[in-house]
Image (cartoon, grey):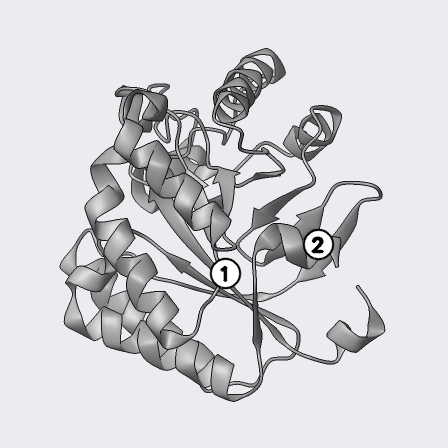
């Protein structure tokens, strides 16, 4: 990155699980974030969420993404189905696929052939809408070790893991960063998320901070309030909002 921007901390807000059915919740999130000062964000679009209809079949959804892109956001590929039908292969895999992600870790252990097919199909869908597919974020940030090499061959500029950003082209480089993320699908997950993110907020961090949101996060007042505090605190401390793409490109 340019020396001038290295000295200024960055805030990357990403909205996960963006698809036609989640649009009402996501659109309200995006509006609120702009009111807080997040003038650009990364929208993680799922082509066929949970094996449902393709996003391109919903004209209103595509128009909304177009509008957000004109305002400075980027569309990011977020898996293809964001779900997996394959059973876990062992205790470790069972934890990550069944407990941690509730069977949403689509790219956790996909073969190269299947992963390549899904990536190419998704990029064609993006291209048909005029959306560059520069970034890929695996559901749950879980992916096979060899997937970054495949992503680079397929022309992606970056991917991410929970603890940072992996720029893939023109040269591979790792950018460590803190990630705030919430899980709201069960009461125990909400309580744990609030406690963990409260702990993170008590320690200082330089460089990039990521706030990763899911559609239902703002439904829960305590989670919404904590997200607001984190975002405003970072902005008040001089963090500049970036999309993933603009961050790795600057």
Query: According to the image, label 2 marks what residue?
Result: 248
Going from the N terminus, do you reach mark 2 or mark 1 first? 1
Q: Which quarter of the rendered picture does the N terminus lie within?
A: bottom right
* Badge 2 vs badge 1, beta-carbon distance below 8 Å: no
Query: According to the image, label 1 marks what residue?
Result: 40
Vertical position of residue 136 compared to residue 47: above or below: below
Vertical position of residue 178 compared to residue 26: above or below: below
* Residue for point 37% across, 19% down: 86
In this rendering, does residue 199 appear at all?
no
* Residue for point 24% across, 57% down: 28
Q: Position of residue 43 (x, y in %)?
A: 44, 47
Callout 2 secondary element: helix
For the residue pair 109 and 211, the one nearer the viewer reads as 211
Q: CA distance from mark 2 to mark 1?
A: 14 Å
Callout 1 secondary element: loop
Residue 158 left/right relative to 63: right
Residue count near mark 2 (Cα–Cα under 10 Å), binned few <14, some 14–19, many ≥20: some
């Amino acid at each position: 990155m340019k020396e001038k921007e290295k000295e200024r901390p960055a805030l990357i807000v990403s909205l996960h699980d963006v698809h036609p059915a989640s649009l009402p919740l996501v659109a309200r999130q995006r509006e609120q974030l702009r009111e807080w000062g997040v003038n650009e964000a990364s929208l993680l679009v799922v082509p066929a969420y949970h094996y449902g209809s393709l996003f391109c079949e919903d004209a209103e959804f595509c128009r909304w993404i177009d509008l957000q892109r004109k305002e400075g956001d980027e569309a990011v590929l977020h898996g293809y189905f964001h779900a997996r039908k394959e059973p876990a292969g062992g205790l470790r895999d069972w934890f990550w696929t069944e407990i941690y992600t509730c069977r949403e870790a689509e790219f956790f252990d996909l073969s190269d052939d299947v992963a390549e097919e899904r990536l190419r199909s998704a990029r064609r869908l993006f291209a048909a809408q005029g959306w560059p597919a520069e970034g890929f974020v695996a559901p749950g940030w879980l992916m096979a070790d060899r997937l970054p090499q495949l992503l680079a061959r397929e022309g992606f500029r970056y991917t991410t893991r929970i603890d940072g950003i992996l720029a893939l082209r023109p040269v591979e480089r790792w950018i460590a960063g803190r990630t705030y993320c919430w899980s709201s699908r069960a009461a125990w997950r909400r309580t744990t998320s609030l406690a963990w993110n409260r702990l993170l907020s008590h320690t200082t961090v330089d460089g990039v901070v990521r706030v990763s949101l899911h559609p239902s996060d703002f439904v829960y007042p305590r989670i919404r309030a904590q997200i607001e505090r984190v975002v405003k605190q970072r902005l008040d401390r001089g963090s500049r909002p970036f999309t993933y793409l603009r961050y790795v490109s600057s």
